[in-house]
Amino acid sequence: MKKFQVLSTVILAGAVMAMAQYKEIAVANGGSISGIVKVKGKAPADEMKEVKKNPEQCGAKMAAQKYVVSASGGVEYAVVMIEKIAEGKKATAGDIFYSNENCKFTPHVLVAPVGATLKVRNEDDMLHNSHFYLVETSGKKNLINMALPKKGQVIENNKILRKEGLISVECDAHDFMQGYIWAVQNPYAVVTGSNGDFKLSDVPAGSYTLKIWHEGLGEKTVSVKVEAGKDAKVTVEL
Ligand SMILES: [Cu+2]
């Protein structure tokens, strides 16, 4: 009896996990969600960080890229994602590339699928670290620290993108270097462009929760209804 109970609990846990997983389907006559992420009120000025190490290559100061806001208030480097979508288009497979380039993590904010291999490359002729932390409500949790002393060096890792969530990338050699990676379970996640613009396409018709995240302006969720063959317009203020 006890054995059966344990077994059935395992089966039940497995079933719950399977239910929570994203299912890839062919999306016929889907809709899209497009719009702009804007700053509410006056845009904060970007932070300028002092360069203590390698200023001859990096310059005396580096922009943090924390607040990259267009003249019309559009916020670049925000992430827009559909939360808990059960099924939809196929996620693109393949390795994800991430660079240490000109004393910056490039791209500054990246969206990457859970399960992908991350290929981290140093494009600079100096030592960089890529120190990955999982950002949790209780604080930052160390994932891995990669030392990349040589230009052209690549380290690949298939464990960093193991679970859904926000990853902070920092360089121990240069405290002004900061990047973010969102590991996501479904392909409906995108980083906003220079005007704060975004588009999510081939979304099955339905009602969804859209989550918007930005490193300095915080996060917000909005409800959005997608109709077949139509574009749902969303403007979000952070
Ligand atoms: Cu560095």
Image (spheres, rainbow, N blue to C red):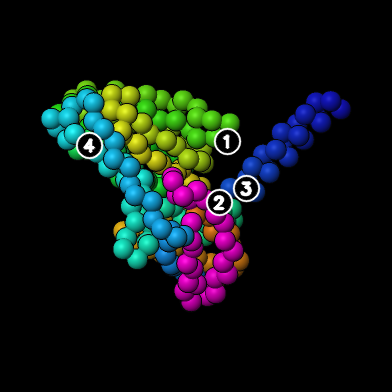
Q: How much space separates mark 2 and mark 3, taking CA atoms? A: 7 Å
Question: Which residue lies at the image location 14% right of the left edge and 32% below the top edge?
Answer: 57
Amino acid type shown at disc 3: Ala
Q: Quadrant of residue 206?
A: bottom right
Which of 45/97 is in front?
A: 45
Eyeballing the image, is 105 above or below 23? above
State which tag comes first along the sequence, 2 or 4. Answer: 2
**Secondary element at image label 2:** loop
- Is residue 106 visible to the viewer in this orientation of the structure? no
Q: How much space separates mark 2 and mark 4, taking CA atoms? A: 43 Å
Tell me the tag on residue 61.
4
Q: Which residues are magenta?
A: 213-238
State which tag comes first along the sequence, 4 or 3. Answer: 3
User: Residue 6 at what x, y percent from top left?
Assistant: 77, 29
Q: Main secondary structure of the magenta part?
A: strand
- Nearer the observer: mark 4 or 3; the answer is 4
Task: Say which residue label 1 marks.
Answer: 137
Question: Which residue lies at the image location 48% right of the left edge and 72% below the top edge?
Answer: 233
Question: Which residue lies at the image location 40% right of the left edge and 30% below the top edge?
Answer: 132
State which tag comes first along the sequence, 2 or 1. Answer: 2
Which of 140/11 is in front?
A: 140
Asked whether, in this view, residue 105 is left or right of residue 159, the answer is: left
Amino acid type shown at disc 2: Tyr
Q: How many marks?
A: 4
Q: Residues within 10 Å of mark 1 (few under 14, many from 20)?
A: few
Tell me the tag on residue 20.
3
